[in-house]
Image (cartoon, rainbow, N blue to C red):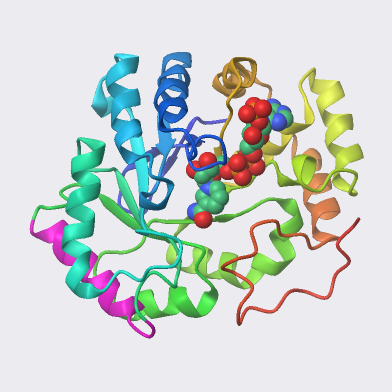
Amino acid sequence: MSSTLKLSNGKVIPALAWGNGSSGLTASGEMAATLGAAALQAGLTHIDTAQMYFTEAETGEAIRNAGVDRVNVWITTKISESSNTKTTLDDVRRSVTQSISRLGSIPNLLLIHNPFVPEEGRIGEFWTYLETLVMDGTLEGCSLGFSNFRPQDIEEVMKVATIAPVCHQLEYHPYVLAHLEPVLALHRKHNIVAEAYGPLTPILRHPGGPLRPVLDKIAKRNGSDAGTVLLQWIIQSGAVAVTTSTRSENIRKLAKLFDQPELSQPDMQDIEEAGRSVHYRFYSEHMTKDFPNPALPDGK
Ligand SMILES: NC(=O)c1ccc[n+]([C@@H]2O[C@H](COP(=O)([O-])OP(=O)(O)OC[C@H]3O[C@@H](n4cnc5c(N)ncnc54)[C@H](OP(=O)(O)O)[C@@H]3O)[C@@H](O)[C@H]2O)c1
């Protein structure tokens, strides 16, 4: 299993990210800085952050404290000043410049955090404004993408994009596959790579569903655990896995993910089949409005 994925613009993104947007980490900047440094020292090379997590400064601090070279770390951040504030076109430049200043460098990937960050009906103009920032050097070398976009939001971007979106960060695991089908079809059409957040939802937030025995069987055979198998499934499906951990034991496990034997094609199919029999979404705040759920049981 490769530890990187190639994006449509030729850049190479680390396929496993350590996020500092999970509860506990957002509540304590200090933890985000210390544990971020620990993750980098363990060998992880991708940090996922966002304006809304208030951990961008700690992301920069983690890189400095870990003693790793900035060029060897991939930073994904997201424009989203707060959970319920819109960023107007007049504010985009200031907002992005402040992110760069907090991070201490230009991020590798900037995402629009959700389709409700731009003002109503202005997703296309927002995208064009971000392109301007790339072209005038403010975001030199930065790739662009979005997060939690429904099919209609992706179409708005594709109508105007001259710089193609390379990534879409969204809740992605086997229990949302059926719901995501129209989104994933657009990913295939436009060569967009999924960044999967909440990847461990099927074992942490929806325990006991039909996937568990399938994951356990594979994990037993490979001498790993259900979480490791899920993350492998995400990455072998061609997505970036955006997980996190606050425990050194799990951070070490994450850093060794690429030493694991690959999942076989039948393993991949068994996981997909069990996942597709259920619809369960944990982070429902953005992708449920005007994007109907499939008629499937929740598997509980
Ligand atoms: N774009 C968005 O709207 C959005 C939304 C949500 C999240 N995110 C990003 O995604 C990141 C991860 O989100 P998430 O917390 O939902 O991810 P997750 O991978 O579903 O869950 C992370 C949790 O898994 C546990 N864990 C780690 N390795 C494990 C293993 N091998 N077995 C069992 N449990 C394990 C960790 O617990 P311990 O700490 O105990 O190890 C951690 O609390 C966030 O920090 C954020 O950066 C983005």
Quadrant assignment for the N terminus: top right
Task: Say which residue appears at 63% left-offset and 53% top-offset.
Answer: 172
Q: Is residue 69 left or right of residue 187?
A: left
Foreground: 223 or 31? 31
Where is 166 relative to 290, above or below? Answer: above
Where is 172 relative to 55, above or below? Answer: below
Q: Spot the residue most to the left.
A: 136
Q: Is residue 236 visible?
A: no
Question: What segment carries the magenta color?
Answer: 120-136
Task: Say which residue appears at 32% left-offset and 48% top-offset.
Answer: 109
Task: Say which residue appears at 83% left-offset and 30% top-offset.
Answer: 218
Which quadrant holds residue 106? top left
Give the quarter the ligand 1 occupies: top right
Quadrant assignment for the C terminus: bottom right
Which quadrant holds residue 68? top left
Which secondary structure type mostly characterizes the magenta part of the structure? helix
Residue 129 within the magenta-colored segment of the rendering: yes
Q: Is residue 243 left or right of residue 141?
A: right
Foreground: 66 or 34? 34
Residue 30 within the magenta-colored segment of the rendering: no
